[in-house]
Image: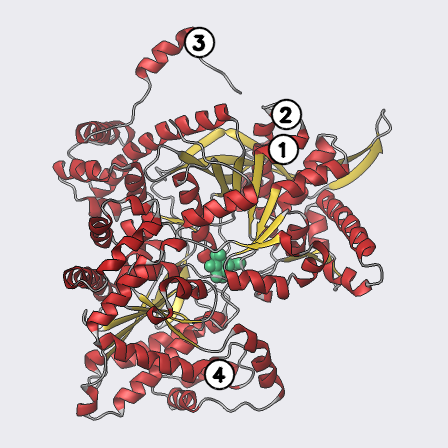
Amino acid sequence: IEASIPSASREVWQKFALKEFVDKDEFQQEFIRHVETTLARSMYNCDDLAAYQAASQAIRDRLIVAWNKTQQKHTTKDRKRVYYLSLEFLMGRAMDNAMLNAGVKDITKQGVADLGFNIEDLLEQEPDAALGNGGLGRLAACFIDSIASTNYPGWGYGLRYQYGIFKQRIVDGYQVESPDYWLTFSNPWEIPRYEIQIDIMFYGYTRKYTNDDGKVVHVWEGGEQVQAVAYDVPVPGYGTETTNNLRLWASKPTREFDFEKFNAGDYESSVRESEKAETISAVLYPNDNFYSGKELRLKQQYFWVAASLNDIVRRFKKTHRPWKEFPDQIAIQLNDTHPTLAVVELQRILIDMEGVQWDEAWNIVTSTFGYTNHTVLPEALEKWPVPLFQNLLPRHMEIIYDINLFFLQQVEKMFPKDRDLLSRVSIIEESTPQQVRMAFLAIIGSHKVNGVAELHSELIKTTIFKDFVTVYGPDKFMNVTNGITPRRWLHQANPKLADLIASKVGSYDYLKDLNLLKKIEPFAHDSKFQDEWVAIKKFNKARLAAHIKQSNGVDVDVNALFDVQVKRIHEYKRQQMNIFGVIHRYLSIKAMTEEEKKEVTPRVCIFGGKSAPGYYMAKTIIKLINAVSEVVNADADVGDLLKVVFIADYNVSKAEIIIPASDISQHISTAGTEASGTSNMKFVLNGGLILGTVDGANIEITREVGENNIFLFGHLAESVEDLRHKHRFSDVPLDPNLAKVFEAIESGIFGDHSIYGSLISSVTSSDYYLVSDDFQSYLDAQKLVDQDFKNKDTWTSRSITAVANMGFFSSDRAIDEYAESIWNIEPITLD
Ligand code: 9GP
């Protein structure tokens, strides 16, 4: 229901409309008001948690004022908007980011300090909003920050999971999962929109009839209905009033419970329905780069997509434009194949509910959508069994058959004799049971398909989507290299470095135009600047060392080389190669004389990351890392020359502490497997160098920072197929150093070796991830790192030069590229 204040009364309204606090006093006034009224507490019982809640409420109010202005402006300007559909938004904490972006950090810090609080302690109270698994979800979070910061009108649409990614503990060396109920103390950063409720249907059946005008009408009578309720999260841009929206949907029952059963005394089953409805958005699926065909997951996808499209279409209809103008007003980006059902849902809305003809509708649909592919890993590609799909979404299945039919007819016309091509590009895979290939549906339903780094975008054209290049030509496929927001990943994570850079750039403008980093390059060899640079790195290492001491009870030397690999644990990311390398290092040190030991560069090898709960091999890798860490850290022969640490429960907040402290970070996926990687960008931006394979965005990082400022190793993507073939069809000898590592594991020095049997045999048999093939080259690169780290001046100048050349990797640049070449949208400023 929309109701406006009559024009005559607006003056009163405007007189008292909430203003954004502008100074410390006004902040404090808001803070105290929230303590005393919102929280119903007083100065006698205001602890850190209450202070965090009050401060965040005050800041949130400020964001809401800006949010309202932005939305009004966007509505009056009536220009094209983008909607970014992502099943994951790995936001992390909001408060620090909101203070920075809204420009109220100093006011708030001073404001709470006067009242006896330390801002750092308050920030620690906030739970991470961990509504994502890894890179894909964090990318979405960076992108919405950039869309707001660059003043584009755009919303994110996602799910409001009650449980984010599980919490990880390490017990006896093993990963143990526990649920992440992050909403215990409610969430001050969201605005529940109970008035926005959308009915969503599942199951049921379809029928068709001919209406009075002789038109065939399709009807879907759903068997189950739930309600989607909107929760809005304001997304403030940096250094701009623009505050966009992230709308997250929660599922609710349509009726509270079954009254008949309730009245009949059957209390338990009366609430069962409502519990079932709430399950839909309850929990995030904890798989990264892995598809597991669970019906509930498909339900989540449809629930979210249907609610979002209903919302988008409702907004469009208010403008009373003809349907053909829909793509002039709206761009929708599919973040991976998870939202692909949106293609079918929009077609269904247009043809079944709005009476648009098929061809016109399909034209609207394909002009509206863009699809981003984030992986070539076959195990990650979504394919839904037709029987499951048909049962859950019968009308959508019919529409998919029609989309496929028309598409295949078009292909047949272009390539009349190629039956094989038809079956290769069909949306329906002819397996038992048949499967719906979601990536194919996404390609066919979109006007642009992009990969996320140059190599990856080339690979999709020559491997998994090759046939579609044949059908559509190459222009439909493009690259937009990923980026990261420098607001969180430089200023927030590493404020001292941000300040030092600002002192040379002349301002913080580089946080908006990251190419300005170039201005620090002339200081790469300036000894004063180098000293300051090194002191900041040391400060960040000490901060991490304190964290390690607290969480792992291990003392690490801040002068040692900090070598970090933090990311989801996955065989293709090759944490196993890293830990095998650590074992090799350990064995080498053990074999050294005291004289030889003096030449060793001391290292702290830091690991972190979650394994999908059902991923046996990844869990074995975690166990091995912890087993090695226990032995090495207790070995007096080795002392500070080598320490191994596994930091439990890696998440966005921990990344903000770990990343600024690294000297070297590892991005060592088998060439051709990591689509982009984004933590590689974060590490370099924070003055760490990379040890990496020629894969994903490592390649473009090398191009930007110069090959002297990165340690590359390993086989190239173009050799991978041949190497795998050799492993399959001949006896490839195991790398001799790796053989020694395996002997050590099998000797039992790291405990029961049978635990690692399958991990070892995965390398000795097929070695799909080419660990043995790359091992010598990896050790050589590590040796070079050891040597180069000794030369502190050169190392520091390389670090500075690398940072100076990271401008390209801002997510603002990525968003500008999407806006220009896929979405066709323009910025709107508030003044
Ligand atoms: O594995 C990719 C990662 O390389 C990339 O940086 C990220 C963002 O584009 O997406 C990841 N892909 C997935 O999580 C699943 O497609």
Q: Which residue is mark 1?
A: 326
Residue 20 picture quarter: top left
Q: Which residue is mark 4?
A: 773
Residue 710 picture quarter: bottom left
Identified by mark 4, the residue type is: Asp
Identified by mark 1, the residue type is: Phe
Could you tell me residue 307's position as x and y percent?
Answer: 57, 37
Identified by mark 3, the residue type is: Ser
Question: Is any part of residue 45 visible from this angle?
Answer: no
First in residue order: circle 4 vs circle 2: 2
Disc on res. 321: 2
First in residue order: circle 4 vs circle 3: 3
Between 105 and 599, which is closer to the camera in this rendering? 599
Could you tell me residue 422's position as x and y percent?
Answer: 78, 60
Between 150 and 278, which is closer to the camera in this rendering? 150
First in residue order: circle 4 vs circle 1: 1
Q: Does any atom of ligand 1 lie closer than 8 Å to the CB of label 3?
A: no
Residue located 39% across and 28% down the image: 830
Q: Is residue 781 left or right of residue 436?
A: left
Identified by mark 2, the residue type is: Arg
Tell whether label 2 touches label 4 (CB within 8 Å): no
First in residue order: circle 2 vs circle 3: 3
Q: Is residue 752 above or below residue 124?
A: below
Residue located 36% across and 29% down the image: 66
For mark 3, give the secondary structure. helix
